[in-house]
Structure formats: structure tokens, C-alpha cells
Image: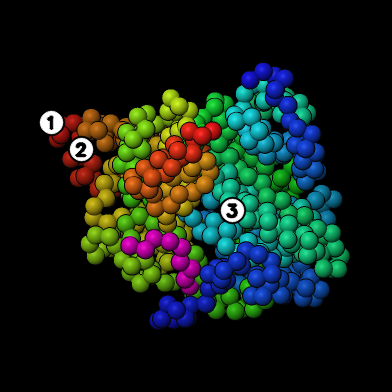
Amino acid sequence: MSAESVRFSDERLAEIEALVKRYPSPQSALMPVLYMAQEDFGYLSMDAQQMVADVLGLRLMQVREVVTFYTMFREQPCGTYLLEVCTNAGCMLNGANELVSHMCDTLGISVGETTSDGLFTVTEVECAGACGGAPVVQVNNIYHEKATPETMDAFIVKARSEGAGK
Amino acid sequence: MTIPSDPKQVKQICFDRINIPNVNTLSVAREHGAYEFLPTVLKEFDSARIIDEVKTSGVRGRGGAGFPTGLKWSFVPRNTGKPTYLLCNADEGEPGTFKDRDIMRFDPHLLIEGMIMAGFALGVHDAYIYIRGEFLHEANVMNDAIAEAYAANLLGDNILGSGYSMNLTVHRGAGAYVCGEETALIESLEGKPGRPRFKPPFPAVEGFYGCPTVVNNVETLATVPAILKFGGDWHASIGIPNNTGCKIFSVSGHVNKPGNYEVPMGTSLKTLIEEYCGGLQHGSVPKVVIPGGSSTPWLLAEHYDTPLTYDDMVKAGSMLGSGAIIVMDETADVVALSRRLAHFYAHESCGQCTPCREGTGWLERIMVRVENGQGTEDDIQVLKEAATHMAGRTICALADGAAAPILSMLEHFPEEVRARLVEKAA
């Protein structure tokens, strides 16, 4: 991605201008603006981080500190479908480890990897805050609760047929 | 004690409307009492009266610390010349906790109404809901509800013609457990890494951008409309003295019906698990119950009858915490669970205090060895020493939380740990 292609649209810039007014200081808008950049450009490249710094009048270091501290900001691209499996206490007690192994076997990848067609990335995450529905898999931030090898297999098959058309 | 013998008679405080379809919309919420009492509060109550009612109610912070809410509010200095901020802690990240999510996704107007009342009492004009980043759906539901509230003049300038104005903004976190600690949350809301601050100064005096700031949990704020409507005395009559009202318990692990249950304080652990959660998946008594989220010390079968109150949990050697009850039956591998929790705390340590940054890594590395049958007797000693020397020696309580499961495992299940050591496994 070249620096030229990393530019917020005018609509986004208007949105950011309104957002900044909701806080005592523009730095508070950093996390929401990083989410916007991640949504618009797929991940937070160095160019994207520099652009965010420029838009909010911050130093690049202030942006880097935040991007590297929080797990939901990604500096690398991931698959079309990001499958985040919670393996913390409640999910572990209800089969999350077996579930993540099954998903990786099905897709032929290890945890943290992306399939060669660029469709799926599987990661393990910390408690998703939905332990009543354990085990929980977040698919692009949508919660799939009481997930089983069967429901995830079905999801993967469906996503593959849809993803092939993209 | 006012606990009805029939659980169906329990009057719920936060979950009263939770099963009503579409109660997340303003029109349906209003049909069921939302904002009904707000005009009276804005017109007839003043700050002192609201804070008095909340004090009388006895409600204690539902996020984990259990500090009396009315007292917390009374610490906010007035006429400092600086703005006062209200922050709702919706970072809900303690493993086992998932109650605030249900309030926000099903009854967002309850939280908004509670925040308007709290904000009015504290003289706040800008309030924020700091919600964990993973709760995207919940943030969207909250934002839709807030937009409806603005359109109905329940938020913004001159609310319902009262002369009182308050803005409310949803702010998403981005995956950092430590931001549930109130000063880390403030740092994060200032657009910085979420590293806890030294206290004092407490946020009530010097918080968000150095201004007086109140940070309250979602469930705490959601109790405020009922307290003001029915009175502090009414709330104090539920539960038992010093542990009043209802509490939402998030029950997970080896139970047949995991989920959120709001019950009067003082209900026993056993009643909750057997009458509400359909009992255990295997066996009749739990092997381990973690009563207040993964950072609280473990309870055993002998504690099964303990009443669910802040005070009784302390007497039993643990804490009520956020009311996140993780239940393990006889099939649970306590070594594997402790290793997994050690990984969690090592991953989430913000790194600014040495005992936590280094200690959580040590605990995880040793637990990996022990789980894989490569641990030695010396490892047990190091685990014990490291865990003991971390707790209480850091800015925030994350290190204490990391130590708790390790110390509980070593105290209650030494034989299961020793059976995994290298000499024994050989």
C-alpha cells in the first residue's frame, strides 16, 4: 500500500472533526480514529499510522504506543474471515482447546496463520466476556456462541462458497 | 432477610425489563417505565438528596471492588473550577464476567437513564461509556439508543426543559484487560496505553485530564433509576445489611444452564447453582468454585452453602468480585486451568511494574513445565515464592489476580500438582 492510497475520504475527515469535539483533547479520539483507519485500509500500516498522527496533530510515537499496546489494532493484514477463538477459563472448560485444534486441522494452518487463499485467519484470544455461551468464536467481531466443530465446519464451508465469488 | 423461597418472586433491579422484546428501542422501553421518573428527579431532587438516597440504599460498586457508591460520589469536590466527568466502566474483561453485556445489548436505556441521574447528581456535563472493543454489537446498540435519547431531548442541551445538559459518548477499548482498572481506563480514554496510575490522587479528585472523575460499573449505574424511584430504604430492604440489593451473577463452566442470574444478595451459592443453573454437569458438589472472576481465590465443596455477599465471601477466604462464578466439577484439570490463567495474566500485564511484568512470565513458564510433566519440586517452591512476592507490590491488582489461582492450586490441590512432576511422571 503506497502512502498516496492511505488517505481518509472527505466524509471520514468530517466524521473525525465531529468526533474530536466530543472530547476535551484530540488525543482522546486516537483509538476511534485508528478503528476507522483499520476499517478503511484493512490494517494499520506505518503510512496509515502516520496519517492518523497527522490528522490528530500527534507525534507518530504517540500513535505507535497505542497501536502496539492494544491487541485489536493490527499492523499486518489478516484473512477475509478473522476467526478468534476464546480459550480462557469458561471456554476451556467447555471444549475450546479441542475446537481450535479442529478448526486448524480443517483449514490446514496453525494458530496465528492465514490460509493460502487469504480467506481465513485463526487466532486464540483472551476472555471475550460471553462465558455463558462458551465456547465463543468471534468472526470479524460477530460472536458465535456455543460453537462446536460442526457449527464451525458449516461456517467455513459457507464462507468458502461466498468468499470464492469475491 | 427478604429472600423469597420461590425464585420467581424475586424482584429484579437491572434485569426487570430484560426479556421484553425490543426493549432496546426507546418507545418500547418507555412503555415499560424507562425515563418515567426522570422528570421528577430533574425537577424535585437536588444533588445532596440523590447522593443521600444512594448512600441509604447501601449499593456497593458492582464492578468488583464493592466500594459504597454513595460514598464514592460524596468524595467529588465541588466548585473546583474544573469540569467533572462521569465514566461508565463497560470494559468487562475479568474472565468469567459477562453481565454488563446483557444490560447494554438488551436494555441500553436503563444504563442511559442511570447515567443521566448520576451525572445530574454530580454536576457532570460530559459522560462517557468505555466499552471493551470486542463488544462491537453492544456498542452499536448503545449508540442507537443514545441517538434516540438525544432526539427525545433526554440527552444534550437542557434535558426535558430542566436546564441541565449532558452529553454521552460511547468509546471503544481495543483489547486490554488492564483497562478495566479505573485509572488505566482513564489513561486509555485520554488516547494512551492503558497503564494504571498511582493512587492517590484518586480519580474523584484528579482523574480524566486531571479533573474530578467518577468511574462506575454498568450494573452500578443501572441500579440508580430504581433506587431513586422506589427510595434508598426500599433498596436497603433487599438482601442483608451491608450487602443490600440484588446482584447479577454470571455463572459459567461446568453447569447445565450457564448464564446471568440476578438474585437478592445473600442467596447461597448452592441455591444459585442448583435452582437457577440446573446443577453441575457431572457429580453433585463442585470441585472448585471461583466466585468473583478469575482473580479471586478458589472455594471448595465445603463452601457450597456460603451466602453470596461481599462479607461472606471474604469470610470464606475469597471475594465476591464482579459476581463472575466459574464452576468446575470433578472432571476439571486444575493444573491446566491454572496454566491457562497464568498465560492470561502474563499476556495482559501492562509491564510497568517489575514484579508483575517479570512475575507473570515466570508463573506461566513454570506452569507450562508442570502441565507438561517437566516440573520439579523446586518449581513448586519458585511458584509459591514468585506468587507471594508479586501480590500487593504493584500499582494495580493485576499481579494479585495472577497470584490467586496459583496459590489456590498449591494450597488446595498439592497432590494433583506433585503427580505431574518429572520424578513422578517418569
Could you tell me which quadrant the N terminus of chain A lies in? top right
Start-end of magenta stretch: B256-265
Q: Is residue B401 magenta?
A: no
**Does residue B45 lie above or below A28 as drawn?**
below
| Same chain shared by disc 2 and disc 1 | yes
Q: Residue at x 30, y 42 (%)?
A: A98
Q: Residue at x 78, y 73 (%)?
A: B39
**Does residue B275 lie above or below B172 as drawn?**
below
Q: Using the rendered view, name the quadrant where residue B287 is placed.
A: bottom left
Q: Secondary structure at mark 2?
A: loop
The mark that comes first in sequence, 3 or 2, is 3
The answer to whether residue B187 shows anywhere in this view is: no
Q: Chain of mark 3?
A: B
**Lateral position of residue A63 relative to residue B284, left or right:** right
Q: Which residue is mark 2?
A: B420
Q: Secondary structure at mark 1?
A: loop
Measured as percent of width and height from the top left, residue B167 is found at: 77, 55
Measured as percent of width and height from the top left, residue B374 is found at: 23, 30
Q: Residue furthest top?
A: A2
At label 1, the amino acid type is Ala
Crowd class of label 3 (few under 14; some 14 to 19; many from 20; radius 10 Å): many
The answer to whether residue B232 shows anywhere in this view is: yes
Crowd class of label 2 (few under 14; some 14 to 19; many from 20; radius 10 Å): many
- Examine the residues drawn in magenta and state their main secondary structure: strand
Q: Residue furthest front?
A: A165
Tag of residue B426 = 1
At label 3, the amino acid type is Glu
**Does residue B334 lie above or below A104 as drawn?**
below
Tag of residue B138 = 3
Q: Secondary structure at mark 3?
A: helix
Q: Using the rendered view, name the quadrant where residue A57 is placed.
A: top right
